[in-house]
Every structure is written in C-alpha cells, then in structure tokens.
Image (cartoon, rainbow, N blue to C red):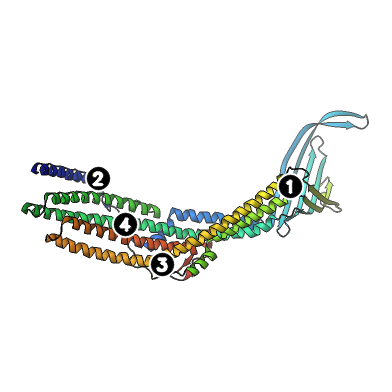
Amino acid sequence: MRFIFSISTIFLFGLGTLVSAQEQEYFVEAVPEDAVVLPMALDDVIDLAHEQSLYSFRSKNMYLARYWEFRSYKADRLPILSLEATPVDYDRSVVNRFDSETGTEYFSQRSYFTSDASLSLRQNVPFTGGVFDVTSSLSRSQNLDDEDDIQYASVPVSVGFSQPLNGYNRFRWESRIEPLKFEKAKRDYLQSLEGLAIQATDYFFGQVTAEINLKIAETNYSNADTLYNIGKGRFEIGTVTQDELLDLELSLLNASMEVTRAKVNLRQSRAELSSFLGLEDNVVIECEIPDEIPELKIDPEKAMTLAIENNPDILDFQQRMLEAEQSIARARSESGLNANVRANFGINKNADEVGVAYGSPFADQQQLRVSLSIPLLDWGLRKGQIQMARSNRDVTEATVKQERIDFEQELFIQIMEFNMQEKQVEISAKADTIAQRGYDVTKQRFLIDKVDVIKLNSARNSLDAARRNYISSLRQYWRSYYQMRQYTLYDFVDNQPLMQELDYLLQQ
C-alpha cells in the first residue's frame, strides 16, 4: 500500500510540475498591461454598437439602397427632359442610280455628312398607363460632292401620346407595391437595430460569463490550495485518508488548469466584443452587470396588436400577395389581344437655311397608328401562363396564411416566456445567495472536520452552478426584452413606439 501511495504521489507531483511549467509558458494575462479599460453598462454597449458596428453600417446602407429605389419610383412619375443628338454621321457609299433621260441604271459614289438633335419632354400617365411626349428636333444634311447642297429639316413642336390597350397598367400596380416596399424597408431597419441590441447582449454577457468563470476558477484554486494544505496536515495525524488527500491534490491541479483556461476564454470573449463594436485591439471593455431589471409584464393582446401594426413581416405578407395578383394581371394582358395606339401631331419644314427652316408657314405633321397582336395558335401556351400565375398566387396565399399563424403563435410564446423571465431572475438571484451561504457553512464544517471532501466539493459545484445560472437568467431576460421590442417595434418601458423618421441617415 505504501508503495502504491509513493507511486501516486510521484505521479501527482510530476503532473503538478508539468502544469506549473505550462502556466509559465502559456499563461495569458486577463488584462494586458497596455490595454485601455472602458467601463460600460449594457445600454452603453448597445448604443456604441448602433453607432459604429459593421452590422449597423450594413443595415444603414441596405435601407439607403431601398430609399433610392423608392426615389426612382417617384421620379418615374415626374416629367423627364432629355436631349438626344448625333453630332457626326458621315456616309460614303456606292449607290444604284437611274438616269431618266437614257433609261439606264448605273452605280456612283456619294458622300453625305448629317447631324441631328432633339429635345423631348416625356411624362408618364399613371392613371391610364400611357406616355405623353413633346418633342422638338432639327437635322442638317450636306452632300459633300456638292457644297451648295445643304438641307435643314425642323420639327419645332410635335405632341404625341402612346397608350397600350391590353388592360395592364404597371403604374397602378407600382403605386400599390412600391410605397409598401419602402415602408417595409424602414421597419426592417428599425427592427435591425433591435436585432443589433440582441447581438450586443449576447457579446456583453458572453464576456460577463467569462469574467464570472475566471472569478470562480480563481476562487476554486484558492480554496483548493487551502484545503490541500489542511488535508496534508490532517493526513499526518491520520484524520484524512490517503484517497481523500489524493482527491484534494487532484482538485488543486484541476483548479490550476481551469484558471489558465478561464483567462484564455476571457481574453477571447473580450476580443470578440471589441471586434463587434469596432474598437481597437488594445481596448478592453469592463462590463458592468445590470443587476436591476424593470418590473414589466407585457399584455399579450396589446403586444399582438402592436406587432400586426408595426412588424415588417406583416407588410411582407401584403407585398407578396400583391405581387402574386400583379403576375396574374400581367399574364392575362399578354394572353389575348394586344393593342397599342400612337397619336402624334406637330409641324415641320425643310429649307436650305436654318432661319428659313423655322420660319412660317409650316407643314402639318400628323400620325395615328394602331398596332395589333392577336394569338391564333399557341398550343395553350398563354393559357398555361395564366394558370401558372394563378397557381403561384394560391401557393403564396396558403403560405402567407400559414406564416401569419406561425408568426402569431411564436409571438405569443415569446410573450409568455418574457413574462416568466423576471421571476426566473429573482429565483436565480436567491439561489445564488443561498448557494453562497451553504458553501460557507460547509467549508467551515470541513475546517472543523465535521464533513468530508465529497460534501465540500458538492457544495462548491452547487455554488458555481448557481452563479452561472444567475448570469444566464439575466442574459435571457435582456435577450427576451429586446426580442419583444423587435417583434412589436415598441418600447414597453417608456410606453412609446420605436417608429421614427430616418431622414438623418440621408445626411451621413
């Protein structure tokens, strides 16, 4: 038995020496010496994330892209003035000519230089889907083989209107869909801010958990060292068995490794938080744990109403249904008679000089064109396109209904879970206090040799679990709180909506 004990002692001593050497080589300081320490509460971390995190930058630019898309939609309904010109058009070619005197054909070369310019004003007509335009143009043509052969053709004014007669008006559909898309984009951005708060909460409490784990590891190491020294003394007088002493020494070695591991994890969690906030590598956030939580119970009916009014997913449901109906209308317009009407009225004149080309009298320029396209035999192609559009509409409608049900059920579950979080925090805080007292009593009883090592380790494990559970309950509370804000876009603490104008983003 003594031989076995000696071998075990030598092994544990060697293991302790190895761990000590590893600590010297791989030991990581919890806070580097050149670090800049910034004490920050959870609200401060969230505000900083809104201000300069990469996620915030991406969300802003996604909103701005949707804003300019909406601006393009509105601009398409305003008059558009455009200038079109062909300054140089040189043509040198061989043409077939006919001599009327001799009645023979012959080939000859010709060289022409032409240029033209037109100024047009175009206005879409959303009510009918047509296009109204006013154009003024001037062209010049010169025969380079005859310097005196110069012609000017002017159209001082030409007024036209084009109207498709197939029954599909894209402007009317856009007027229903585009404002809805832009409003959804605004709510998506506001919702992304709450999603950013959830991310910040995870990183914040990830570091807090790492700090708690380090404190636990350091406390456990200190306690294990004390208990091991006491155990060695008791082993000499025979009140502690050899197995118990080995267990104490093994606990000391494990505690030493846990301290090193906890410091590495803390360093990593701090780096992740700093990276998320866009801070320099030498900046360390000192997290201030939010021990106080608001006394808040959310009314499920109120939250459901707010979510239906504010959540962008509801607008997404509406948008998808409108787009499905639009696809049916487009397919119908392309399946039967396609007709377009173009009417144009203006004045024009040809002359050898520019001034004369714009002088009275002018000749009338009139045009009326009706174009038709009638499918005679397409083997059911167009009918199939309509049926496909209808089937897609039916699938979209069923999908949207199911997603709406899932949305409401998930929201209800989230409300119930949040309303339980306050009690969970209270229970975990009390459990942490009780576990601390229980461990202190057990430790004191061990010091007077009233309990064994097994009970002491059990009390210590209960204390560690209670502390971690308390931090976990705080983390879950704040995650649930910001999730409720994300669902409803409503601040339940200050009782005010999170909806706001986002014009300030355009000035950044």
Where residue 473 sits in the image (x, y, percent)?
35, 62
Residue that lies at the very extreme toward the right in this rendered image: 101
What element does badge 2 sit on?
helix
Where residue 192 sits in the image (x, y, percent)?
48, 58
Q: What is the three-letter code of the residue carrying label 3? A: Asn
3D distance between C-alphas at marks 2 and 4: 22 Å
| Crowdedness near tag 4: few (<14), some (14–19) or many (≥20) residues, C-alpha within 10 Å | many
In the rendered picture of this protein, how many numbered marks are placed on residues? 4
Q: Tell me, for residue 419, which label it has, or none.
A: 3
3D distance between C-alphas at marks 3 and 1: 71 Å
3D distance between C-alphas at marks 1 and 2: 78 Å
Mark 1 vs mark 4: which is more N-terminal? 1
What element does badge 4 sit on?
helix
Residue located beneath label 1 in the image: 117
Where residue 274 sits in the image (x, y, percent)?
36, 54
Q: Tell me, for residue 26, which label it has, or none.
A: 2
| 1 or 2: mark nearer the eye | 2
